Amino acid sequence: MFGEDAVRVVETFKGVHEITDNEIADKTLIRLNLVRKELYRFYDHAIVALRRTRDKETGWFIFNWRLQPEQLEAFILDQKRCVLEKLETRLEYEKSHEFYTCQTLGCKRYPFEEAFELLFKCPACNKPMMYLNNERIVEILTRKIEQTKVV
């Protein structure tokens, strides 16, 4: 969900209570504005907390960030739950429909009801549509659901 830069930013929190965005940029060699972008994305999900102080010499704000591991775990579990729900919904859809396609690369497949309305002719290429066995998709979705439940 967050990307490679975000992973590198999170890794800088290991072994420290708090760290500034400048220190993170120095350690990761990621541009400061990109570090701040990732930190604010984490902040929006309560994965990190922020403490702001003012530099007495320059008057600029210093942002001290700290990881909130309990929030990170809850966030990951919530994301996992959302993915699991989507996989289960898709599996149910795959199991409860028959699909038809013209088997032309780039053309989509249609559930029986739509294919019937189209008189089993592909609206994109006008080729006749044939039954598509989706057992492999059902197998893959079932396996992904089981993997997601275990992890």
Image (spheres, rainbow, N blue to C red):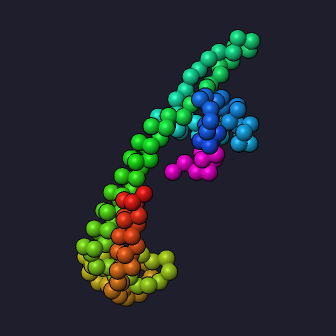
Give me the residue at 59% from left, 29% from top.
Answer: 17
Q: Residue furthest front?
A: 15
Q: Main secondary structure of the magenta part?
A: helix
Which stretch did the figure color magenta?
1-8
Between residues 45 and 102, which one lies in front from this camera angle?
45
Q: Quadrant of residue 145?
A: bottom left
What residue sits 35% from the left and 80% below the top? Answer: 135
Camera-side residue: 113 or 77?
77
Quadrant in which the C terminus appears: bottom left
> Which residue occupies 31% across, 63% down?
88
Q: Is residue 71 left or right of residue 96?
A: right
Residue 85 in the image, given as x and y percentages of width and height: 33, 57
Residue 10 at what x, y percent from top left?
Answer: 59, 41
**Quick one: 33 or 91, which is closer to the camera?**
91
Q: Is residue 4 magenta?
A: yes
In the image, is residue 94 part of the stretch drawn in magenta? no
Q: Quadrant of residue 53?
A: top right
* Spot occupied by residue 100 in the image (x, y as percentages of width and height): 34, 82
Residue 102 sits in quarter: bottom left
In this rendering, position of residue 5 left or right of residue 68: right
Q: Is residue 45 above or below residue 112?
A: above
Q: Residue at x 64, y 39 (%)?
A: 12
Where 118 falls versus 22 (above or below)? Answer: below
Asked if residue 44 shows in the view, the reply is no
